[in-house]
Image (cartoon, rainbow, N blue to C red):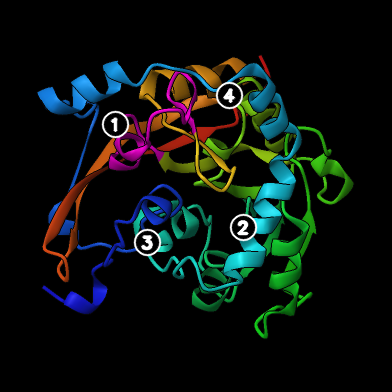
Amino acid sequence: MDESRMFQENTSDNYLNSVAPICEDDAFQKKGHSARTLSPEEAEKLARDQALVSDFKKLKLEKDAQKNWDLFYKRNSTNFFKDRHWTTREFEDLKACREFEDQKLTILEAGCGVGNCLFPLLEEDLNIFAYACDFSPRAVEYVKKNTLYNIERCKVFQCDLTKDDLLENIPADSVDVATLIFVLSAIHPDKMHLALQNIYKVLKPGKCVLFRDYGLYDHAMLRFKSGSKLGENFYVRQDGTRSYFFTDEFLSHLFMAVGYEQVVNEYVRRETVNRKEDLRVPRVFLQSKFRKPLSEA
């Protein structure tokens, strides 16, 4: 095993409930359609922690969502997430969707953060033009200040996917593949469909959204303390940012209600190892692909 490729995760409450895993050895990974089974202790903890945050605080968190993500990037700059070099390995469609070799691809990274996925992609594939957007104005500014930022290869802009029309920055039916990687979970469940409708408008017919996000009973979900629950599978971190934990059934319904076709929708279960602290924690993600139909029904 190449230990340099292992993601050594800090398991403090703040870190574990904020960070998406970046690169882990495939030996620890299992894919399938079965959700993780809780231990009796874990089931007891979730059953015990049913108290919800007050309605007043819920409304304030929704109102302050952009501010809280902006403060997150102010505190952490570009150093919090590792570059996501696993993206092209695990989502083969980023390369395989070409109709011929060296075809120029147009991609959309919805929720680009500070470019940890965007820039590795542009480095690995010189025939990609990328649109990238983020909820946080500060994150967008960090992307634009990156030495790898090149307006001939990418267009980056601030956008609230639930209300800002992507058509203001991207032509209709022009995107070959869109990515939603650890993004939808940060949006209130009642508004997730709005983000999917927005992306639908710019995606070419027959092309796909590649999705990866937190799955039900991921270790991060089990680490939330009492008083953090906003609703079913929906929690708030100490810094005010929020996270939803998906079931495959919920995600499938969400996409298909908007008009997408399901191609792949499966759990990815991993055991993350922190060798320094000799800790092994179960991680659960949902990795999926949904396609815009070739013709409208």
The residue that mark 3 highlights is 22
Which of pointers 4 and 2 indicates the residue nearer the eye?
Answer: 2
Query: Which badge, 3 or 1, comes first in the chain's sequence?
Result: 3
The residues bearing labels 3 and 4 have C-alpha atoms spaced at a distance of 24 Å
Is residue 105 shown to the viewer in this render?
Answer: no
Amino acid carrying label 1: it is Tyr
Tell me residue 177's x, y (percent). Answer: 58, 49
Magenta-drawn segment: 214-235
Q: Secondary structure at mark 1?
A: loop
The residue that mark 1 highlights is 217
The residues bearing labels 3 and 1 have C-alpha atoms spaced at a distance of 19 Å
Residue 158 got which mark?
A: none
The residue that mark 4 highlights is 189
The residue that mark 2 highlights is 72
Furthest-right residue in view? 168
Whether residues under marks 3 and 4 lie with C-beta atoms below 8 angstroms apart, the answer is: no
